[in-house]
Structures are given as structure tokens and as C-alpha cells.
Image (cartoon, rainbow, N blue to C red):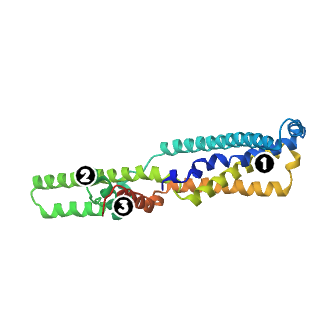
Amino acid sequence: MDFSKYPIEKLFYFVLGIIPGFVALFIYQLAVPETFNWFFASCFLGYKVKLVVATAVAFVVGNSMTAFLSSILGAIGGAYGGIMARRPQTPYSEEAIAPWRDPRWRSALKRRLGDQAPKDLQLMAPQVFTWRMQLIDTQFQDEATRDIQRTQLNLEKVGTEINDGQWAQWYEFYHQILGTREKEDLEWFVHRRLSYNLEVAAIYVLCSAIVVPQLRHWWCIAPSVMWVAILIAFEYASVRRFNNKWATLLDQIQYLSERDIRAGKTT
């Protein structure tokens, strides 16, 4: 989807920043009632100017709040990624079942990469390797011939493992892209941005309730807790999706196929 056709999407995230901004200003007014009295009581400014100024201040404050929360979530995500990167990884060839061996995905990637795609080889299973090794021992009587056949079989096995690793690296590459990419859907985009700004406002309400007694009512706390819970659930689902390699298989097939269509390629 070409977002340039929808100018609202380029500004929607920033415009919605007035939601947490107005909440923050309202809470500050509750905590210090006399703060804005002089501004609204002034006679040299019309109500339209006051409304514009208040909206502009809410816009700046709200977007600062969303940027701050985004930076915190990004730092947490980066720390989590660093921890996961230090964990010992299972070699690709030891994965009994893996999404990068799916024939549909491989076909889509081959169409996309053309001559740059790895050879479409099947990983040699341990059972097949053992069976073929036993077959060599029974089929050839000469020890020198056995050694040659064993060496060739080992080279073939290593070759399939290297090839499998090449496919896995391409899959990881697109998994990194699609595992964190948001949907290119106008309705989902608007809904997610609206929800995120409400979640930012909810966090501010809960934090402010510690020092502002006027906010300690169920009709303030309950909605805020709900939106914070939604934020936690969304981030948890995002982490689960990123850690689950199978989660992006169909998305990758669709993504690669769409790029083929855009590039004028046919199946």
C-alpha cells in the first residue's frame, strides 16, 4: 500500500498525541488548580487563540510522552534481543522440522532471488546418513573404496547442511523484517495508533494517581488498568511472534509473491 495516497496516515500518529497531552494538562490542573487560571481569564486573547494554544501545548506534551514510552520499549526490546543473542543457538541442520524447508517458501524466494538463490537441496536426515553408511560397508569389500565412498558421503552431508544454513539465513533475514513490521492496512494502522496513545495516557494516569488523590477513583483507575493490560498483551504477542520462526512463514510467502508482482515477475 502506498501511504502517500493517505496523507492522514503520515500525520495521524502525531495528531493523536493530543490525547495523552490533554490528559497530562488536565491532571496537572487537578494537582495545581491555579496553574492555567491566568491564561483562561486573560482578556487580550480570544477563545479561538486560547484553544489553538492549548491544543498546540497538548500536541507537544503528548508527543513527548509517546516518544518517551517508545524509547523505553525500544530499550527493553534491545536488551531482550541482546540477551537472546547470547543464548546458545541450535544449529540449523539439527532442526528436525524448519519453516525454511517449506517448498512454497523456497519457490517464492527462488522467484525473488533468481540466480542468487541457493540450490534447492534437501537436508540429509541422520537416519538416511546412517543407512547409506551401512550400505557402503556392505556393498564394498575393498577398504580403500569404502574410505572413498565414506568421504564422498560425508562431503555430501556437509554440503546439504551448508545449503540448509543458507536457506535458513534468508528466512531469518525476512523474519527480521516481517516479525517487527506493522500491517499495511489503513484501518489497523489508525486503530493501533489510537490505542497506543490511549495506553500512554493510561500509564500517565496510573503514575499520577500516586501523588494526585483526585484520580483515585474506580472510573479513572479501571480504564487505565485495562489499557495498560492491552499494551502488555500487545507487546507480549509481538515478542512471541518474533521468537516463533513459524509465525511469519505465510507472511513471507505473501510478501515475496507481492514483490514479484510489483517487479513484473510471473510464476
Amino acid carrying label 3: it is Trp
In percent of width and height, residue 40 lies at: 86, 40
Q: Where is mark 1, residue-wise?
A: 205
Residue 180 in view: no
Amino acid carrying label 2: it is Asp
Secondary structure of the residue carrying tag 1 is: helix
Amino acid carrying label 1: it is Val
Identify the disc placed on residue 115.
Answer: 2
Image quadrant in which you'd find residue 96: bottom left
Q: Where is mark 3, residue-wise?
A: 105
Secondary structure of the residue carrying tag 2 is: helix
Q: Which numbered disc flags the more N-terminal residue, 2 or 1?
A: 2
Real-space Cα separation, disc 3 to disc 1, in angstroms: 46 Å
Q: How many marks?
A: 3
Q: Nearer the viewer, mark 3 or mark 2?
A: 2
**Residue sitting at 37 percent across and 49 percent down?**
169
